[in-house]
Image (spheres, rainbow, N blue to C red):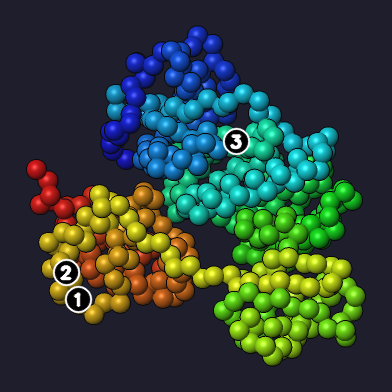
Amino acid sequence: MAFRPHALDRERATLALGSTPLGHGTSGVITRLEGGEKLLYKEYAPRAGRVNGTALADLVESGHRDPELRSRCSWPMARVVDGDQVTGFLMRETAGGFHRTVGAELDLATRHDFAVQAAELVLHLHGKGWIVGNLSIHKILWRHGEIFLVGCDGLRRHGAEPVVRPTGISSVHDPWQPPTGPDFDTDRYRLALLIGRTLSGDPTVRPGEPLFLDPGFPDRVSSAVSEMFARAGGPRGGRPAASEWLQSLSGRKRIAVPRPLLGGVRAGVLSDSVPEDPESENLVFVTRDPEDSEPEIFEFEILDVEEFEILDVEEDEYAVVVEPVAEQSPDLSVPAESLGRRVIDSPVYAEQRELAPRTPVDDVTVAFLVTHVADGNGRASVADLARLLGEEPSRMVMLLRSVRGLLNVEQTEVITLKDNDRTVVLNVPLLEEQFLEEDEP
């Protein structure tokens, strides 16, 4: 892979490095910069192998676009280069007061807060398309009300190569990890392991094994967490996502309700025929529409679905308040200077659009897809794109074929589908050559 300079690159020869390294890892050495910059330099060791400079540049750019990554992670802030070789990167020095482990010696509230924040961070990273990879309790520092993820150069885009290839097998290795390496499902396994070990205080328990939580945790939390932990030990594809862990850690359950309840908040009161356990499998609710004086009676089961969420449970009165989870349209906006926006604003694209006016994909979607895939080093999972667009995977393939018809000028392979239509690959240099060469000075 040819070396491509980046605007934020720092020459190694210009760094004022401390005389004593702060630590040696499996892939490199960390040294503090002198001069008050409060930055650390990680230099990759020869045993780390080839450094993927493009993947590291993607990490750097993402950190500068996302303040949350910079505040909660030791995110790479700049590549360090020696001529045309990437030797390492700079990252912000961790603030004082952080601890390295969370164990059984801590109070229940601290362990619960740590688990919630870990799930929130994984949810944010997955939402941005990042796979954590080696997620473990040893990679997360903590202090009261705050966590900090280290080793962030190990993250990679879904469908893209990492900065350096990991070596060895981690103690939190997913036994069902695919040969292609960690993915979102692997992260879900490791998040379950992290949460289970944190809450139980058992450093050896694994998903699928019995989980024994301290009786000081609320019964609803213990029950929901144990259920999630058992699911995480099952086959790939069924492991709880970070959003489900947040729901379980709150002690709430989701319920399926009849369609007549769609459209507003309703208060339901359990009928006299229902057992005194408000968590029984089947519940009968007398519901009243705020705009309708006549009550309606419905029977339904407690299920783990997205349509409605319990907001409050008043056990003494057996009252449950439910609210529909609003369906949000995906945000497909991209900056005016983004690659996708520049492509659809180009004269060449206008000509392509005239040749295929009835294609089912609109320009906003094209701009979003081009920008997103380009930001992922030219590769993206079709399933991930379907999730971002709120589309079914089968329809996503159809949309991508329409995009291919718009961008593959004169049969050039600007954008292709690989791996039996599971991965989309974008040739960014060729795309720029076909659509943007007239923009060059």
The residue under label 1 is which amino acid type?
Ala
Marks 3 and 2 sit apart, C-alpha to C-alpha, by: 47 Å
Residue position marked by numbered label 3 in the rendering: 148
In the picture, residue 59 is in which quadrant? top left
Q: Is residue 235 left or right of residue 83?
A: right
Q: Are marks 1 and 3 in contact (CB under 8 Å)?
A: no
Res. 305 visible in picture: no
Marks 2 and 1 sit apart, C-alpha to C-alpha, by: 7 Å
Q: Secondary structure at mark 2?
A: helix
- Choose the circle earlier in sequence order: 1 or 3: 3
Residue position marked by numbered label 2 in the rendering: 352
Q: Is residue 296 left or right of residue 330?
A: right
- Residue at left offset 61%, top offset 84%: 291
Residue position marked by numbered label 1 in the rendering: 356
In the picture, residue 185 is in which quadrant? bottom right
The residue under label 2 is which amino acid type?
Gln
Mark 3 burial class by Cα count in 10 Å: few <14, some 14-19, many 20+: many
Res. 435 visible in picture: yes
